[in-house]
Image (cartoon, helix red, strand yellow):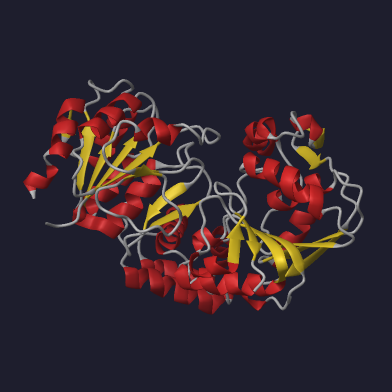
Amino acid sequence: MHDLKLSVSEVNQIYKELNSVSGFDFSNYAFSFKMRKIILLMHSLKILNIEDFIFRLQNSQHTVSEFVKSMFVSYSEMFRDAEMWNYLQEKIFSKLLLKKEVKIHIPYCVTGEELYSLMFFSGLYKSTHISILVSHPLSENEELIKNRIFTQKDLKACQKNIEILDFVKNTEDVFAGHTNQMRVNHIYRGELNFEYCNVLNQQHIAEFDLVLFRNRLIYYNDDLQTEVLRKISGSMNKGGLLIIGEKETLGQMSGKYKNLKSNLSVYKKRIF
Amino acid sequence: MQQRYIIIGGSAGSFKIVTEILEAIPKHFPFAVILILHRLKHIKEGFTDALRIKSLLPVSEPFDKEKIIPGRVYIAPANYHLYIEPNNTFALSAEEVVNHSRPSIDVTLSSAAFSLKEKMTGIVLSGANNDGAAGLRDVINYGGTAIVQDPEDAAVPTMPEAALKLSGTKNVLSSQEIIEYIKNLNFEL
């Protein structure tokens, strides 16, 4: 499988075909990521040349669905980058979540780890005036996110993160239930809404106080990153907070934001 | 002189040779050195600093979309895969672990093999799993240079043995020979 050699034009051809059969346009995703996804799928299907692969895309909805799903990388673990969650808890949530009304947006939710991490922290406050909007790019994942069940493997993935958190120390403080059938033991009292939406198509204007958008920009090329950030920026209140992944940058949009802490990617939208 | 990239993958037992390599690289080394080292995902502070003090070159963990600059040492950040893009930039990814690792040596070497072709040298050092083997095979397939630390010289031979077996490279060097190769690389071109 790994002997398979693809050219740039072949990679582009495959994604053009994927767009044609699925409606999902990944043309402006990072190239190496796109190529790896093709190779992994061809390997799993035991397909050795692109002609056969394209034929499969044209004739198997299941393959198309698997391909699209693989492009929307799920979050790797709850409380990823625990230092960031500690900072949010200590410096941001402690003020923000005491406001009369708070609107939070997760513009790109695939399997819910980021949402449940946020809901856990939000649940530490008594406020019922928190509203979280969850946008998800895969309609079939909405029920999975709403009823997210966590397994022992999920717990193991986030165990070290929990040890670093200032406010909890054990997985039992976060999860409740039986082996491989656990839920986040949160007491979130706010409003929770879901929408099936591509970030670029969203129509929200200047309404969110906090946007949690971590480790998504890494899959985009420069053009798409700028376009997505422009859309997100338009959806935020002046002075609203944007949180991206610790190794992501705002690129061309950096002038629109002020970094609140140098080693963490927490940004405040500038008021011009 | 053609731009060249040295990509080194290491795991258990490789830290010593990595520090020796960094100590040996001269100040005006004209190529980028990219280190993919298996590391604990929660240990962020200190790891890069420990390598930085060994090197005369600037050492950093790249940000997503950062341009690759010659004469610098880059270390794959903890808990991310590191891709090398055809436009001479880094791209990061939080995809699933590969060979129980994130960063995975295979992920970086395979993307670099495609993007850099004959301009790269991939080196697989000591380690306890098979990571790097498939990536090194890609390096050869795309015309790059593949080097494996001699398993007899490696603290943990599993990773170099696997790389040797899968890639079939003839370039099997001891740690000292790898250091000499890198130091003299600019004179070989």
**Residue B147 placement: quadrant:** top left
Q: Position of residue A72 (x, y in %)?
A: 58, 60
Of the 4 image quadrants, the one containing the N terminus of chain B is: bottom left
- In the image, A167 versus A49, the foreground residue is A167
Q: Position of residue B79 (x, y in %)?
A: 51, 42
Q: Position of residue A82 (x, y in %)?
A: 64, 40
Tell me: residue A52, above or below residue B72: below
- In the image, B85 versus A38, the foreground residue is B85
**Residue A139 placement: quadrant:** bottom right
Tell me: residue A100, above or below residue A26: above
Query: What residue is at 40 percent from the left and 53 percent from the top?
Result: B83
Tell me: residue A214, above or below residue B75: below
Residue B174 visible in rendering: no
Q: Position of residue B53 (x, y in %)?
A: 34, 31
- In the image, B141 versus B70, the foreground residue is B70
Judged left or right of residue A245, residue A36 is: left
Residue farthest to the front? A272
Tell me: residue A58, above or below residue A93: below
Query: What residue is at 20 percent from the left and 41 percent from the top?
Result: B27
Residue B13 visible in rendering: yes
Judged left or right of residue B134, residue A120 is: right
Judged left or right of residue A56, residue A156 is: right
Number of numbered discs visible in the structure rendering: 0
